[in-house]
Image (cartoon, rainbow, N blue to C red):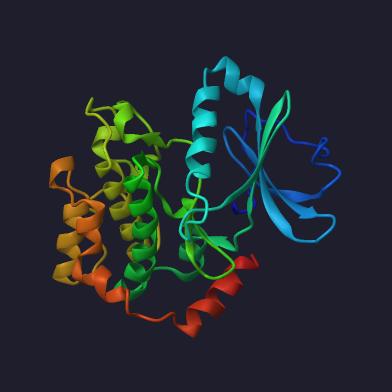
């Protein structure tokens, strides 16, 4: 897991740590704060024995308890734990629970795709579909196990040490059979049914999120709604985007149908370009 170091410290329900408590202090050195979110703080830590670096997500229990969010937090841990070994889901390596905190240790990734887009601008269709295919493979695994992510966006797509896209941050994730409704996710990437229209959340929520991510890749910036289409798109890509961003969930493709789209099936045979590896190495140094 990696979160870009914030320019402005936002308020978090979890307070900053001066040092790690036991049993973590004996094993890990606290290096720096990587990111601050509404509910958690992510640190870079180093194993004192192996000198390997990791990301440590820290969540304070009491603010979550009073907001009745502890079950959601435990569900997040369970969901990520169910997908160990997936090449396109960020790997949770260790969970440590103390009386006051949860500590989730993840692999340390090089960059997020929000960073990539900020540094590189708009992608070509070929580049965008290469990355999107990896995101779809991760989503396919989630949907096959009955999980809906509900917050797919470029900042939740990380690049690992091997150059693979990994999905992270399952704080809004749920099980498809939960039948949830209501507002969730991030507005620029949220489907109509997750912005309060009363419809139950299904796996089609994630298809909309993937469509908004594809918009972002092609625009090089945050999309401003489903009508914010990049200029010069092929008719094939425009049609696919319009299907993914349909206001009606039934009109969106399933993840399996999406992976069968010509743009995505072709990208299966496209090899990594050396230039992209150099670019990502540069972004990860920011």
Q: Quadrant of residue 203?
A: top left
**Which quadrant holds the C terminus?**
bottom right
Q: Position of residue 110 (x, y in %)?
A: 60, 63
Q: Can residue 179 be seen in the rendering of this structure?
A: yes
Q: Quadrant of residue 177?
A: top left
Give whichever of 223, 133 is nearer the camera.
133
Compared with residue 12, is residue 186 higher up or lower down, i.e. above or below? below
Give whichever of 252, 155 is nearer the camera.
252
Is residue 69 left or right of 214 when viewed as pictured? right
Compared with residue 234, is residue 250 higher up or lower down, i.e. above or below? above
Q: Residue at x 72, y 24 (%)?
A: 100
Is residue 218 left or right of 28 when viewed as pictured? left
Q: Can residue 9 be seen in the rendering of this structure?
A: no
Q: Position of residue 79 (x, y in %)?
A: 47, 39
Q: Residue at x 14, y 61 (%)?
A: 239
Q: Position of residue 160 (x, y in %)?
A: 56, 64
Q: Residue at x 58, y 39 (%)?
A: 37
Q: Residue at x 32, y 79 (%)?
A: 269
Total numbered circles: 0
Is residue 18 left or right of 87 when viewed as pictured? right
Compared with residue 4, is residue 41 higher up or lower down, i.e. above or below? above
Compared with residue 36, is residue 267 higher up or lower down, i.e. above or below? below
Give whichever of 236, 254 is nearer the camera.
254
Residue that sits furthest to the top in the current view: 66
Q: Position of residue 133 (x, y in %)?
A: 34, 65
């Amino acid at each position: 897991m990696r979160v870009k170091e914030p320019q402005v410290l936002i308020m978090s329900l979890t307070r900053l740590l001066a040092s790690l408590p036991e049993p973590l202090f004996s094993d890990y050195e606290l290096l720096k704060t990587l990111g601050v979110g509404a509910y958690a703080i992510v640190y870079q830590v180093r194993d004192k024995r192996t000198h390997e670096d990791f990301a440590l997500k820290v969540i304070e229990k009491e603010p979550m308890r009073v907001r009745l969010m502890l079950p959601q937090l435990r569900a997040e841990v369970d969901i990520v734990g169910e997908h160990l070994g997936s090449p396109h889901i960020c790997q949770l390596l260790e969970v440590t629970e103390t009386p006051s905190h949860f500590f989730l240790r993840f692999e340390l990734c090089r960059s997020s795709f929000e960073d990539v887009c900020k540094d590189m601008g708009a992608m070509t269709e070929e580049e965008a579909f290469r990355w999107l295919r990896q995101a779809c493979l991760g989503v396919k695994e989630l949907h096959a196990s009955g999980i809906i992510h509900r917050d797919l966006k470029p900042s939740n797509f990380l690049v690992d040490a091997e150059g693979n896209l990994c999905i992270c941050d399952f704080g809004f994730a749920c099980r498809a059979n939960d039948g949830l409704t209501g507002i969730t996710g991030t507005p620029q990437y949220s489907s109509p049914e997750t912005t309060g229209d009363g419809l139950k959340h299904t796996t089609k929520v994630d298809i909309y999120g993937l469509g908004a991510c594809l918009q972002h890749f092609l625009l090089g910036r945050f999309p401003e709604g489903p009508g914010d289409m990049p200029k010069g798109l092929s008719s094939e890509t425009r049609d696919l985007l319009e299907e993914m961003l349909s206001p009606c969930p039934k009109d969106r493709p399933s993840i399996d149908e999406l992976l069968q789209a010509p743009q995505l099936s072709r990208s299966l045979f496209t090899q990594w370009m050396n230039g992209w590896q150099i670019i990502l190495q540069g972004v990860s140094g920011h």
